[in-house]
Amino acid sequence: MAKLPPNVRAKRLRSGVTAYYWEVPTKDRKAGCTLVNEALGQDLAPAVLKAIQLNDLLTAWRRGDEGAGAPVPGTVRWLFALVEKHPRFVKTATKTQRSYLQGFRLVEQHQMQSGRLFGDVDVNALEPRHADALYEALQWVEEETDDGQPVRRRRLATANGAMRAARRAWSIGLRAGWCRGNPFLKMGLDTTAVGGMTRPATRAELDAFIAAADAKGCPSMGTAALLAFEMCQREGDVIGTVDDTGRLHGLSWSGYRSPSAVGARAEIRIRQHKTGTWVWVPLIDGEGELFPGLVARLDATPQVGPLIVMRDQVDRRAKVRLPYKEDHFRHLYREIADAAGLDKTLYFMGFRHGGLTELGDAEATDQEMMSLGGHKTRQMLTVYARTTRTQAANAARKRRVLRTESAQSSERGSERA
């Protein structure tokens, strides 16, 4: 057999043929080489040519690693560079990836009191106290007012996002063996929401928003709010999101079965974009509508596109009605919410929270709430299911029933004795 190029391994398969594989040297992989092992096939000549190309890339990487612009192995910037190419990170939703990358850049470019950049620090030298100090520093930024006066502005949401990004990077790096421990775990980040959590919408606020949307000539916004409240859906699942392949996902007409259709079961299919869970939700049972008013509104909604919720006006360029984009949807929501007299603390996500809170008040079990909300774990559910006076009263009533039954049982036992 001819001598193989460096880093190529020949392996005899069960079928008796020989296959060739190019493998990144261990020392280069540990140093952060971004190349990956590759199968070269079973034909020797093409395998050799491909191996030569890969070895040239490896040589170029080694030269680049010696340059000033490459991250020093073992540093924070080096860890981020490896994480960005790791399969667990690559498979992350595009929007989440973009948020994490912004966090990575913010962390690594932070200048410490010593003058060093945080990205040049050894990943294994960091302790929880260092993460806490970084978090505190990233919360504040110096700006100037219109008259040139310096002022400090707090950017808590930005700092929180950076800490979550760092926590994710260290989590991936820990499992890959690139670092030891995760100093960004259990940091107890300050909340950015008013009152500690997203405020759930009441049904009265839902009705007011729908009325204001209809009056403004934007019935699709009212339908979106109703679906978020009744189906306990996220904003992106209601108005639709586009995945990495360009496919549009959301509540679609193909997943709606109207009771007016012959032989229809009267149900709607919902998909949680975040978890990938599909659920068929019945709309009518033996006693009538399960979500009063929802079927009538859906049946009155014109089917102008693949999604149930589409813009109410025809796009001037496309000449058709298009799905909502996130920024446009949120700005329009705020206009309608203001017109409805809803306060600034109520965001669109509050309709989903309100629906889940109403389920809790109705004494729905965790499993029942998970089946509608699309959560995979009870821990995820606790973020949305709010405790209320109604739930506290329900709990007290159940305890009272238990005590009464226990007392009656004791009395019967005494009488028998």
Image: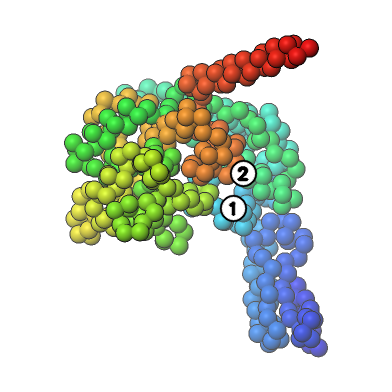
Answer with the quarter of the image where residue 163 lies.
top right
Element assignment for label 1 = helix
Tell me if residue 52 can be seen.
no
- Residue 380 is situated, as x and y percent measured from the top left of the image, at 56, 38
Q: In the drawing, what numbered circle is on residue 89?
A: 1
Q: In the drawing, what numbered circle is on residue 168?
A: 2
Q: Quadrant of the C terminus?
A: top right
- Residue 241 is situated, as x and y percent measured from the top left of the image, at 41, 52
Mark 2 surroundings: few (<14), some (14-19) or many (≥20) residues within 10 A: some
- Residue 372 is situated, as x and y percent measured from the top left of the image, at 48, 43
User: Is the residue under label 1 in contact with that under label 2 (CB below 8 Å)?
Assistant: yes
**In the image, residue 417 above or below residue 194:** above
- Of label 2 and label 1, which has the lower sequence position? 1
**In the image, residue 252 above or below residue 170:** below
Viewer-closest of 163 and 199: 199
Viewer-closest of 55 and 129: 129
Answer with the quarter of the image where residue 376 lies.
top right
Element assignment for label 2 = helix
- Residue 322 is situated, as x and y percent measured from the top left of the image, at 28, 54
Viewer-closest of 57 and 175: 175
Q: Quadrant of the N terminus?
A: bottom right
Q: In the drawing, what numbered circle is on residue 343?
A: none
Answer with the quarter of the image where residue 292 lies.
top left
Tell me which amino acid carries mark 1. Phe
